[in-house]
Amino acid sequence: MSETTPTVDSDFSLRRGIQKVVDFMEPAIVGLIYLCGWSAIIFVMAIFFFVFKESLPAITGIEEIGGGVDAEVEKLDLVEFTTSPKWIPESAKKPTFGILALMLGTLSVTVLSMVIAVPLGLGAAVYVSEFAKGKSREILKVLIELLAAIPSVVWGFIGLVVMNPMIVDVTGEPVGLNILNAGIVLALMSVPIIVSVSEDALRAVPDSFREAGIALGANRWEMVYKVLFPAAKNGLLAAVLLGIGRGIGETMAVLMCTGHSVNMPTSIFDPVRTLTATIAAELGEAVRGDMHYHTLFLIGVVLFVFAFVINLTADLIVKGIKVQGNE
Amino acid sequence: MSSEINNPFASTEQEHRGKKVELLVKFCTLAMTWLLIIPVLAIIVFLVYKAWPALSIEFLLDNPEKKMTAGGIWGPLIGTFFLVLVSLIIAAPTGILAGVYLNEFARDNWVTRFINLAVVNLAGVPSIVHGLFGLGAFVYFLGMDRCLLAASCTVAVMTLPVIITSTKEALASVPMSFRVACWNMGATKWQTIRTIVLPNSISGILTGVILQVARAAGETAPILFTGAMISSRIADSGWDAMVPYGLDDRFMALSYHLYIISTQWQNVPESFKFGTAAVMIGLVIAVNSLSIGFRIYLRARKKW
C-alpha cells in the first residue's frame, strides 16, 4: 500500500510523482487489462458478425437501404450455391453462384500440399527433435522458421516465375500454373507449422519413455516409431490439422499459382480456382449491395467456419494430450 | 560373430541390423529436412541474382514512374513502413495487456479457456476473411473509407494473437518467486507487474512483437480492400516524401505492389519484379535476424 510508505522529503522527485499518478490509476489500468484480455473473444465474434452481416441479404432477401427502410432483393439459391459447379457471377443473362468447383479447387490444392508436406514435415521434426544436437539443431530450426517468414505474395511470385517454367519444362504441359504448382508452394508454406507443432509434440514425450524403449533393446528408429509416435500421436494429428487450416486459408499464393480458372479438377495438371482466391480477385470489382458482393462474403463465412472447426478440433486434440499428461 | 570365446558383450546380428536401420533413418530424415531448406535457399539466391541489375540505392529511394517501368519502390516501401507502424501502435499495447491478463490475472476457469480458444481461432482465421472483416467493420460500418488507418486496424487484429501468445510465454518464464517477493514488500498487483514482471520479460515480448512486424509487412490479402492502391502520386523529396500518406489516405504497399506488377501490369522489367521480391525477403530476413539476436541476448542475460 503506497500510502503507508514512509515519505522522506528528499525522496520527492518527478519520477516519484509520476509513479504516484501511475499507482493511483491502478484500478483504471487493471480494468484496461481485463478489457484487452477479452479482446480476442470480442474480435473473433466481431469478425463473424461483420462478415456474416454483409452476406445476410443474400440469404434473407432483405437489404437495409438506410433510414430504417428495408428493400427486397434477390435471394441466393442456397442449393445451387453448394452444389453447382458453375461460378459465373458477372453473366448478363443469368448469373450463377455455385461454389462446388471452388471448394474442390481448395480441397485438391490442400490435399496435394499435405501429401507433400506431412511426410517431409514429420521427417524433419523427427530429425530436429531426436537426431540433431546442439548448434546444428538450432541452425536447422532457424532455417525452417525462415520458411514461415517468407510472405505469401513472394511465394506466389516464386510459383509464377520460378515453378511455372520448371513445370512446363519437366512435364511438357502448356502452362505450369495448376494444382501441382500451388500444391508444392503451399506445401513449403505449411511445412514450418507442421514441423514446429510436431516437434513440440515429440519433445513433450517424457525422456523416461525414450529410456525405457532403448533399455528394451530398441534402436533409435524403433524407439521413434513404436514409442514416440504413439505417445505423441495427438500432437502430430494437431500439426497436420493446423497445416490443413493454413492450406485452406492461404490466399495470395494460390491466387497466383493455381491458374485461376473455375474448373472441376480431374488431374494435378488442371488449373483450378480456390475459395480464397475468388474473394481476393473479385471483391474489388463487385458492387456493394450486389448479389455478387453478398455471395463473396458468404464464401468468407464458409471459410471462417472451416477454419473455426479445424482449429477447434486441433485445440481439443492438443488439450487431450495435456489432460493425459497430468494423469 | 562366431568367435572362439563367447563374448557376452558382442553385438548380435539383430543389433547390427538395428544400427544400420538407425543410420539409414537418420540419413533419410536429415535429407528430408534439407529437402525443405535447400529449395528456399536456392530460391533466395535466384531472386537476388535476377534482381541484381535493379538493386541500388536509387531503386529503394525513387518512386515508381511511367506505369512502374522506371524509378524504384520508395512509395510502396514507405507505405509498408507506415502500415506496420500504425498497426503496431494499435496491436502491441492491446496484445501485451491481453498477455498480461492471461498470465497474471486469469484464473483457470471456463472464461480463460474460452479466451485461449479465441486466441487460437483468431490466429487461424484465413487472411482474406480478415480482409472481409476490415471492409465490413472499419471501412463501411465505422465509415473510415479505404485508408491507411482502416488497413492498419485490419492488420492489427490479424497480428494480435501472436503478440498475445508470445507475451504470455515471456511472462510465464518469469519465476513465481519474483512476484511473491514483490507482493511481500507490499506492492500491489499492478506495481508488481510494472516494476518486476514486465522489465524481466521485455526481451521475450519484443521478440514476439518483432516477429509480428515481419508478418504484418508481408500481408497482402487483408489490405487488398481496406486501403492499398496501385499508384499514388507522392512527392519525390522533402517532408512529403518522408510522410507521404495521412491516416485517411490510400497508400501503396510492397506486398500489393509486387502482386500488381507481377500479375496485372505488362511491360514491367523483370528485374523490377525480382527486385521488389528480393527487397521483401531481405526485410523479412533482417527482421527475423533481429528477433533471433534478441532471443540469444535474452538467453545470455537470464540469471535464473
Image: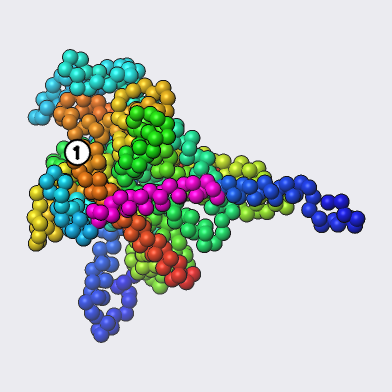
For the question of whether residue A251 can be seen, the reply is no
Q: Name the residue under label 1.
A: B266
Residue B116 locus on image (x, y percent): 40, 46
Name, please, the residue furthest toward the right: B4
Q: Toward which corner of the image does residue B147 lie, by quadrant?
A: top left
Query: Residue A79 at x, y = what percent?
Result: 32, 16
Residue type indicated by callout 1: Gln
User: A136 left or right of B67?
Assistant: right
- Residue extent of the magenta highlight: B30-55
Magenta stretch: dominant SS?
Answer: helix
- Between residues A169 and B103, which one lies in front from this camera angle? A169
Q: Is residue A120 above or below residue A210?
A: above
Image check: A135 left or right of B4?
left
Residue A282 visible in the displayed image: yes
Percent x, y for residue A303?
Answer: 34, 32
SS class, disc 1: loop
- Residue shown at 39% from the left, 23% from the top: A265
Above-or-below relation of B103 to A231: below
The correct choice, above or below, for A137 with respect to A88 in the image is below
Residue at (13%, 41%) from the top-left corner?
A: B145
Display colour scheme? rainbow
Where does residue A35 sit, x and y in percent of width and height? 29, 51
